[in-house]
Image: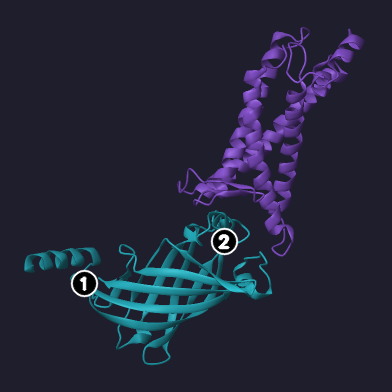
Chain colours: A cyan, B purple
Amino acid sequence: MLKKRFIALALASTLFGGQALAADYVIDKEGQHAFVNFKISHLGFSWLYGTFKDFDGTFSFDADKPEASKVKVNLQTASVDSNHAERDKHLRSPDFLNVAAHPTATFESTSVKSTGKNTADIAGNLTLNGVTKPIVIAAHFLGEGKDPWGGYRAGFEGNTTLKLKDFAIEKDLGPASQTVELILSIEGVRQ
Amino acid sequence: MQWRNSTDSYGLIGRLLHWLVAVTVFGLFGLGIWMRGLDYYSSWYRAAPEIHKSIGMLLFGQMLVRVAWRFFSPGPAPLASHGSLVQVATRLMHELLYLGLFAVMIAGYLISTADGRSIEVFGWFAVPASVTSLANQADLAGMIHKYLAWLLVILAALHALAALKHHFIDRDSTLLRMAGRVSKAQVSIR
């Protein structure tokens, strides 16, 4: 056990050049305890939910210094899945995400402002469909601690609402469907 | 009126199948282009693709009948006036049209059934999915469907131009025998 830990430590210090990484996390893509979901109104009658299956990212977080937190996410827009192959094909087309021209979307935080005991506003730049715009994600810190398998994890949920037109998504889905809500549920594994 | 093809003319079944496929192919092509540009709130937004898919599936069945009919009742022999090059070109074009038709319909079917959904044919019956969840299936099949559809209508247009050339320039009975006027035509031309 001790030996294993030593090897892991040696490996980590080789990989990361011995920097202080106490509060650096990698989004758990391997176990997929992370979701980038969206919901948009259908005609004003119901919510249509979808998800992006392929993304990765990192964040740094210290519960004592939330304002020093940082987050960066890269997302493959072609991985959109709304549980309907024909619709997903349409979502990938130039009517919506235009994934051939803009295969990746990114978010990188610029500042974090604490808004309560476990909440914060994460401001940053979102690049989607080739358009970069500042957005604010209302984040909620859910918890952190040792997992049962020898690691250390921290998790958050975040919400933000985007106007489709702001990101050059020109297909008009009607007056009730001008905005889409992104719901991010992210768990990171401490490195 | 003869039903079956003979050695020098097309029968009623062969002619009906031919012209029905011709009208359907161009109709589906136009419908396919038009429906892609429809507004989300258009009353055709849902109906047009359903009609396109339903007719496409019926066309598939019709093409199976047509191929079976060819075996049961082979088409007439080439006209004696057609040289060997014309005969080879004619045969090649007919084979390409058949192949193209099946390919474009299969590709269309693979778009709509990519996630296991079946295709409802006018609410009469459903064609179940078969091949599903290939990598990028709906998008890939969609691209193939689009390009093959263009190729098919271009081939069909060339096929029609060739028939018109035979009719107006060579003044032979190529077109007339598909129009069911072969005996009279042959009498007047010969």
| Residue named by callout 1 | A151
- Horizontally, residue B33 falls left or right of residue B184, namely left
- Horizontally, residue B77 falls left or right of residue A51, namely right
- Horizontally, residue A155 falls left or right of residue A89, namely left
Q: Position of residue B132 (x, y in %)?
A: 47, 47
Q: Which chain is indicated by disc 2?
A: A
Marks 2, 1 in one chain: yes
Compared with B22, A107 (above or below) is below
Judging depth in this view, the residue of A163 and B168 nearest the camera is B168
Residue found 71% across the figure and 35% down from its top: B153
Q: Which amino acid type corresponds to the residue marked 1 in the rendered image?
A: Gly
Q: Residues within 10 Å of mark 1 (few under 14, many from 20)?
A: few
Compared with B19, B7 (above or below) is above
**Number of marks:** 2
Q: Which chain is indicated by disc 1?
A: A
Residue found 74% across the figure and 62% down from its top: B42
Residue found 37% across the figure and 86% down from its top: A67
Q: Position of residue B172 (x, y in %)?
A: 84, 14
| Residue named by callout 2 | A97
Q: Position of residue B79 (x, y in %)?
A: 76, 10
Judging depth in this view, the residue of A47 and B180 nearest the camera is B180
Q: Earlier in the sequence, mark 2 or mark 1?
A: 2
